[in-house]
Amino acid sequence: MNYKEIVAEAWRFTLENKRLTLWFGAIPAFFTTVYGIGYIIYQYYAFLSSKLFQNWPHSFLSLVFTTTWDFLLNHRGLIIPMIVIALVLIALYFLVPVICQGGLIQVIARRKNGQQVRARQGVNYGFMTFLPLLEYRIFISTLSVVSIFSIMATAVRNLGFVSLNILVPTFVFVLIAALVMAVCFTYTEFYIVIDGDNVLTAVAKSIKLVVENLEETVLLTILMLIIGLRIIFQVLVVLLIPVVALGAVYLMTLANLPTLGVVTGGVLAVAGLIVASYLNGIIHVFAMTVWTFTFLKLSSIVKSTARDGGEVAVAPSESPKES
């Protein structure tokens, strides 16, 4: 397999299909980026308020809950609209990335095979594979890096730094197991979306395909690096956006322009979020294109078995002697 050719073809495909980047890359990236920002802010203040640092009288979540509750009690007319908005945002966060993922894989695979498929048809394909993809994501979420870090962070905040003596070895072991699982499940989503398999069947087929193509370790390493670079970029963006926004608010406040500072910070945050979402969308579509092309290539290879006929090459030193 020519790895450079696959990557180059995937990059050309990404540049030639900008609508896919916008609708199936940037839009879901918007929700995941917002979630990432919220998650980083929560972890920061959760550690800051814990007994490890400032030891606030109440935890950060408790303060958020009580502040929100007091605000709603003083503005009762906003209770129903805010509940509706919160439910809509939560639903969009769980629906949009999964639907876009399924639609993206289908459109990439069909266009790769020469089918004339419009970008908006990806939404239909996404809905058709939504439930099994959601089931699979829930299945693997327990061993994701974010889940492992969240559990460890919660334990450290409640038990103290002494718990790291036990947590770090456990964390390393579980992280290695999660990475091995991620490699074994590399092609699960593609079996679900392209072949229509259920989750358990797709998982079994993915493990089999990975095992059968162990010689493709270099390719898997390159692809994992692509995903790793994307994750690192997302983390940097997640950290940068709130820093820039809060910095603008702080500078304007020092200049006795708090209202202008809030507006400027809000505009910078929204603009940064849009740019970050689009860039993340490009990286995501490119990575998924590489994976999809690789899956189509590897899954189409017919492996020979011990029952198949054919000439067996014999080394000169092992040639049979004439009787």
Image (cartoon, helix red, strand yellow):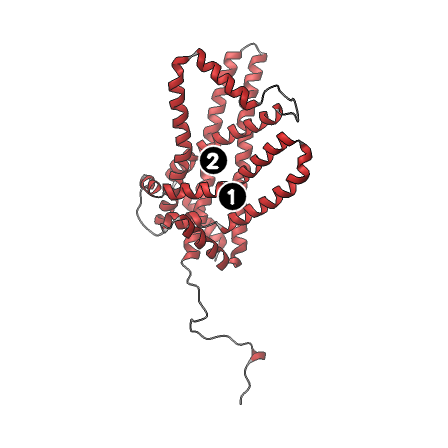
Q: Nearer the viewer, residue 313 or 203?
A: 203
**SS class, disc 1:** helix
Q: 213 above or below 264?
A: below
Residue 112 in sight from this viewpoint: no
Image x and y of residue 263, in percent? 48, 16
Q: Residue at x 52, y 53 (%)?
A: 219
Report the residue marked by disc 2. Answer: 279
Q: 249 above or below 234?
A: above
Q: Residue furthest top?
A: 256
**SS class, disc 2:** helix
Q: Nearer the viewer, residue 256 or 188?
A: 188
Q: Nearer the viewer, residue 322 or 210?
A: 210
Q: Residues within 10 Å of mark 2 (few under 14, many from 20)?
A: some
Image x and y of residue 193, in percent? 38, 47
- Which of the two labelled residues, at mark 2 and mark 1, occupies the earlier sequence position? 1
Q: Amino acid at mark 2?
A: Leu
Q: Nearer the viewer, residue 158 or 3?
A: 158
Q: Is residue 272 left or right of residue 50?
A: left
Q: Which mark is residue 40?
A: none
- Kindly report the distance in space between the C-alpha atoms of the residues bearing marks 2 and 1: 14 Å
Image x and y of residue 204, in percent? 45, 54
Residue 281 sits in which quadrant? top left
Q: Residue at x 48, y 49 (%)?
A: 185
Mark nearest the camera among 2 and 1 is 1
Q: Residue at x 53, y 76 (%)?
A: 314
Image x and y of residue 276, in percent? 48, 32
Q: Residue at x 42, y 50 (%)?
A: 200
Q: 74 above or below 296?
A: above
Q: Amino acid at mark 1?
A: Ile
Report the residue marked by disc 1. Answer: 227
